Image (cartoon, rainbow, N blue to C red):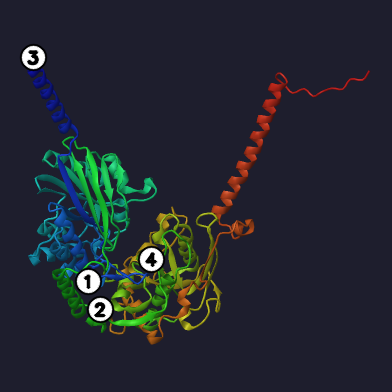
Amino acid sequence: MNTFRKLSVFVISLFLLCTLTIMAGADGPVNETTVLFTHDLHSHFFPQRTQEGAESGGYARLMTALEEERKEHPYALTVDGGDFSVGSLIYALSSSQAAELRTMGAMGYDATTAGNHEFDATGLGFGEMLYTAALSGDKVPALLMANYKPARDNSDRLSIQQDMATYGVREYLLLERGGVCYGIFGLMGEESHSMAPASGFVLEEPTQAAQRCVDALREQGAEFIICLSHGGTDEEKSRSEDEQLAENVDGIDLIVSGHSHTTLEHPIVQGDTYIVSSGPYCENLGSITLSWDSTGKKTLVDYHLTAIDETLPEDPKIAQLVEGWKRRVDSSYLSAYELTYDQVLTTTAFDLERPRSGVQEENPLGNLVADAYLWAAENLEMDSPNMDTVAVTASGVLRAPLCKGEITVSQAFDVLSMGQGENGTAGYPLVSCYLTGKELKAVMEVDASVTPIMPEAQLYLSGVSYSFNVHRMIFNRVTEAALTEAPFLNQSSSQGLEQLENDKLYRVISGMYCAQMLGTVTDKSFGILSVIPKDENGSEITDFNQRILRGDSGKEIKEWYALAAYLQSFGEEGVPGRYAFGDGRKEVSRSWNPVELLKHPSWITLAAVFLAVVLIVLGVLLVRRVLRWHRRRRYGGGYRPRRRFSR
């Protein structure tokens, strides 16, 4: 009996042990992965003043946050989702010193990818940055680009490819950390590519490239796959590129999503893929910890964003490094303008905020920048022609606000920090072209009609006033347009009104990027609007480098310098109070008044009205037909009028 009992206990114990072993092997987490991430850093080496009077960002503080996370997670990976350059004056050292990549290397980044702004200095400038970084001998992050390569017809293709090879650019990376084999690859998004018109690169369809990388990485033993995507997310899933990527590609465990400047308080989970974003401008450091078992099943252990603000001390090593970059900017770039990085230009008693995305309204910062362009053409340009001139800028190029208080040179640059000029130095130059009055109205129509679907296209003009109704037919929303005196001439915007003449040529001042985009209006409006930038003789412009505005010394006038000089002209009195609010140069109506909706109709509106009338008539006829059919059924096959009989 005792023998039987002992045998039973042994068998039951063995059964329970096997069951627990099987359960542990099936569901128990066997690995834990922590990834630290940023994206859209945009050269924010130093803290930025916020509208609340606090500070945000700065690489020395970011380094402190990284070190704290690494103490807790010694095997953590550190990655970035692209657009690490363009956004502060340190960008002036991008090609000559590769300041961004070398600083990221010093902070211990394992990998990054390229965003559209890495190509603001063209593909050649991108290559020069890579060559400089490699030549420095400093530690730099792996640069992963799976679907973005120089076009075959790019005359600089071989040089760029050589620079990419010197740096070691590759599609993907296998990285062992803490006993786990990670596979990491980088992608350029479709919208991001469309915003890099000077890259000279071609885009492979992201989903196709991603699946190719995932399959290759799995074959080579990758256990956990990370995609560094510069595609972005959106509230509308149909426009959320990285959600579409996760849905259509099997095998991606984590997507670090850049480009859309999204701050995700919680990860997006699409199938088996986690999508994370920490926000732009070094505002936060993101951290995600996932546990996963042998079947690939993942569990979220922790996700948090660490604010990079004044509560964090600065890492002394990185602080010393970035101060060195600042001194180089003063000596190698700003000295030509007789300015310094922290020099105060003027003050403002109010905040000048960036435009709110997708909100059609006047924006004082946009007005200020447009006025600065017009002021520069009148006060800085050599041999400026005396004629009717209009200036235009776009929401997409306004990269930073101007907060209440002192405004420094670096803050003025931050507002207009994109691009590179013909001379190879940071900052887009101002350019001129000529448009007819009809084409100027088409430009205003872009502002009125395209902004709801493309917020970056919202425009701000100086030298004209116009009005539009958001409920009118698309591409026929502008109702009034007239020339007006520039506000800096101390005239009200209602004085000096002169109606635009359709066939008359008007001079237009803009930044290089916006001017190049003017030429795409015809295609983007399906040929409904026509805007062809011309020279003073009416011939189409094929090279905007020939249209750069130059000062007395022949030096190109940069967008940011036009703003800085205009701000400096205000002196100790500060930014005029007229910029605290809109001044009425752009009136946005939301009225449903039929008269306002139908006045000055274009063929689009007339066609829509005709179609509506036709549909109404067809609807009435259909209703009558249905009523007759019901009457026939009611009276047994045909309608018979009731007859009266007399006795």
Q: Which of marks 4 and 3 is nearer the N terminus?
A: 3
In this view, the mark in front (1 or 4) = 1
Q: Which of marks 3 and 2 is nearer the N terminus?
A: 3
Q: Mark 1 points at which residue?
A: 90
What number is the disc on residue 4?
3
Amino acid carrying label 1: it is Ile
The residue lying furthest to the left in this view is 3
Amino acid carrying label 2: it is Tyr
Q: Mark 4 points at which residue?
A: 540
Between 296 and 574, the one nearer to me in the picture: 296
- Residue at (30% x, 43% y) in the render: 269
In the image, residue 184 lies at what x, y percent?
17, 48
Estimate the spatial distance between the alpha carbons at disc 1 and disc 2, rounded to whole Å: 10 Å
Report if the CB atoms under discs 1 and 3 are less than 8 Å apart: no
In this view, the mark in front (1 or 3) = 3
Between 178 and 218, the one nearer to me in the picture: 178
In the image, residue 489 lies at what x, y percent?
47, 83
Q: Earlier in the sequence, mark 1 or mark 4?
A: 1
In this view, the mark in front (4 or 2) = 2
Q: Name the residue under label 2.
A: 341
